[in-house]
Amino acid sequence: MRKTFTMSGIPTLTLILLLTCLGARADDLDEVPDPMAALSRDKAEYLYQFAFHCIDQEYPNKTGHTMADAEDLATPSTLHPAFYGCLDWHSAVHGHWTLVKILTLYPQLAEGDAVRQKLARSLTRENILQEAAYFEREHNKTFERTYGWVWLLKLAEALDNWDDPLADELQSNLQPLTDLLETRLIEFLPKLTYPVRVGEHPNTAFALSFALDYARSFQRDTLEALIVSRAREYYLADRQCPLTWEPGGFDFLSPCLQEAALMAKVLPPADYVVWADGFLPELLTGTLTGLQPAVVSDRSDGKLAHLDGLNFSRAWCLYEISRALDSPALISLADEHLAFSYDKISADEYAGAHWLASFALYALKTAMEMP
């Protein structure tokens, strides 16, 4: 069943900030009764353009491809006929997510027909079957584990939420790969004895959080139970997370906040308050005074540009945590992080442009879902 997305109840301060960073004029706010209309009218294309132009841009490309022999030498589009653009496989996947989600949030986008046509050309059944076959090769069974896997699940979730005639067809086409990566995740998590706590792709809390959203959306009870169980085993005893050690120079995820956001989804509200008090007591008071938006010194350097993504992922984690703790102070901090990097995404710097729109949109989406 498709779910309806609304912005009703979004906090006023957050709404004003979102409208401002998306280009709405202050004197427009009283004129537009539906905030989504303002977002659609003013700046939806700001985020759309980055994913639209990169999902079929083959080069430059970082394949992460393991070759068994000379016959495995192939171009990116041969190896991955659906997800060959946006520099790497996972960015291509969440580039597709971005386009689907923008059309879900902004169905009146002027370029909507062009977006639909590009998605239809990419997510064909034949292309997806080839993608699935790639994961079946002997040396590729762990390809994109777990970051790319859970972004694929997030794409499936977005298609399910998209009220458009094309959505059912694309969802059906994607299903073989969705099923395969869901199975891979179920097989892998029991083997992962210790969580990966870094601020980049392998972060386990990030993977569990995205996969849990998918499991609950599709009522995948086995996967949900496994994620909840593993999250408790990995993180329930954690205390005094060293937030002052963050960020690392190449981080685009916050190890502390990502874990706290996951546990907000896993634990009952009363239990979460107790856990958060031991894990990061400042969350309860909202006084994360040392948590300032990360500054990028060179956006042409792909690793350094990660820090803009960190600001967006911190924002969505803070929104999720604030929902669990009913904390306006955390919402304000999330707003600050989101606004800091939002207008710094540049089409001239492909190092960030190939992926940052996805993170910015995910942060915006999470803000819009605030009660």
Image (spheres, rainbow, N blue to C red):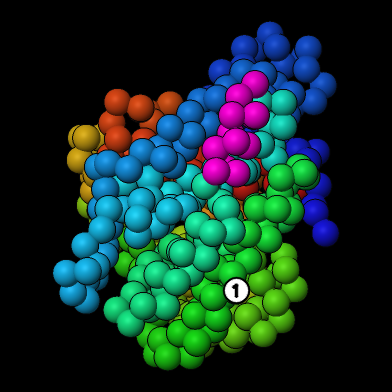
Closest to the observer, 91 or 41: 91
Above or below 237: residue 370: above
User: In the image, is residue 116 part of the stretch drawn in magenta?
Assistant: yes
- Residue positioned 30% across, 26% down in the render: 348
Q: Position of residue 178 (x, y in %)?
A: 58, 68
Q: Position of residue 278 (x, y in %)?
A: 50, 74
- Residue positioned 65% across, 78% down in the render: 224
* Residue tagged 1: 179
Amino acid identity at mark 1: Asp
Closest to the observer, 189 or 274: 189
Q: Position of residue 39 (x, y in %)?
A: 66, 25
Q: Residue furthest front?
A: 71
User: In the image, is residue 49 part of the stretch drawn in magenta?
Assistant: no
Q: Position of residue 225 (x, y in %)?
A: 65, 84
Above or below 232: residue 304: above
Above or below 161: residue 332: above
196 left or right of 126 in image? left
Q: In the figure, residue 30 lies in which quadrant?
A: top right
Closest to the observer, 177 or 206: 177
Q: In the figure, residue 240 lies in which quadrant?
A: bottom left
- Residue positioned 57% across, 53% down in the render: 124
Task: State which quarter of the image contains the N terminus.
Answer: bottom right
Q: Is residue 281 visible?
A: no
Q: Residue furthest left?
A: 70
Q: Which residues are magenta?
A: 110-121
Q: Is residue 193 visible?
A: yes
- Residue positioned 21% across, 62% down in the render: 73
Q: Which secondary structure is most common in the magenta stretch?
A: helix
